[in-house]
Amino acid sequence: MTDIITLTGLVATTPRHLVTGEGLPITSFRLASTQRRFDRSQNGWVDGETNWYTITGFRQLAINITASIKKGERVVVTGRLRIRDWTAGEKAGTTIEVDADAVGHDLSWGTSTFVRSISAAIVDPAAVQGAPSDEPAVAAESAQPDDRPDVLVDTAAAESVAVPF
């Protein structure tokens, strides 16, 4: 059974990025999640216990985490929960890991700017369908929201495939 969890917290370690011998990108970091509550006797907010999680992202998510997430930033993480008991000599403990499906900045604490990471070019839909055109098929990638095209083409793929959105 897969348990899906969503967490908010502080990136406690610098994300560590590696690529396996098979070419799989992996990035991991520790997340500190501290619940806060209002204490009426102190008339203020107080921190509760801190829960610690190891967050791991794979493939494109791993690459994007490395480029986007820094130690000390507040993030939101969604992924599959794994709880593991471990023993090392006389020491024993429990590790709580999350295989991340999504990681992003927590916009309750600040702002962020999104930059698309896959290589995509804006094309004329008539050119994609094979109709002749006097204009070049590919335009600049940085279209504004009002100038959104009808079709995107993934230029990183071996064959260009029209992807409507």
Image: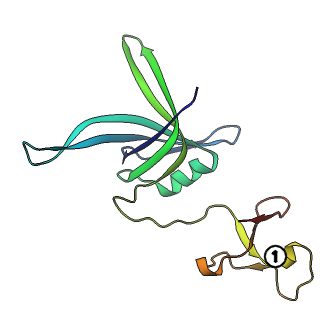
On screen, residue 22 versus residue 17, left or right, reads right
Identified at 29% across, 36% down, the residue is: 50
Q: Callout 1 environment at 10 Å: few (<14), some (14 to 19), or many (20+)?
A: some
Q: Position of residue 65 (x, y in %)?
A: 52, 51
- Count of marks overlaid on the render: 1
Q: Position of residue 22 (x, y in %)?
A: 71, 38
Up/down of 64 relative to 154, above or below: above
Q: Is residue 154 visible?
A: no
Q: Quadrant of residue 106?
A: bottom left
Pick the front one: 25 or 5: 5
Outermost residue on the bottom side: it is 134
Q: Quadrant of residue 142?
A: bottom right
Q: Is residue 103 visible?
A: yes
Pick the front one: 18 or 83: 83
Identified at 7% across, 45% down, the residue is: 42
Outermost residue on the top side: it is 90
**Quadrant (top left/top right/bottom left/bottom right) for the N terminus:** top right
Identified at 69% across, 42% down, the residue is: 23
On screen, residue 44 versus residue 99, left or right, reads left
Residue that badge 1 annotates: 125
Identified at 89% across, 73% down, the residue is: 129
Up/down of 162 relative to 52, above or below: below
On screen, residue 74 versus residue 99, left or right, reads left
Q: Quadrant of residue 152?
A: bottom right
Determine whether the residue tagged by mark 1 lies in a helix, strand or loop.
Answer: helix
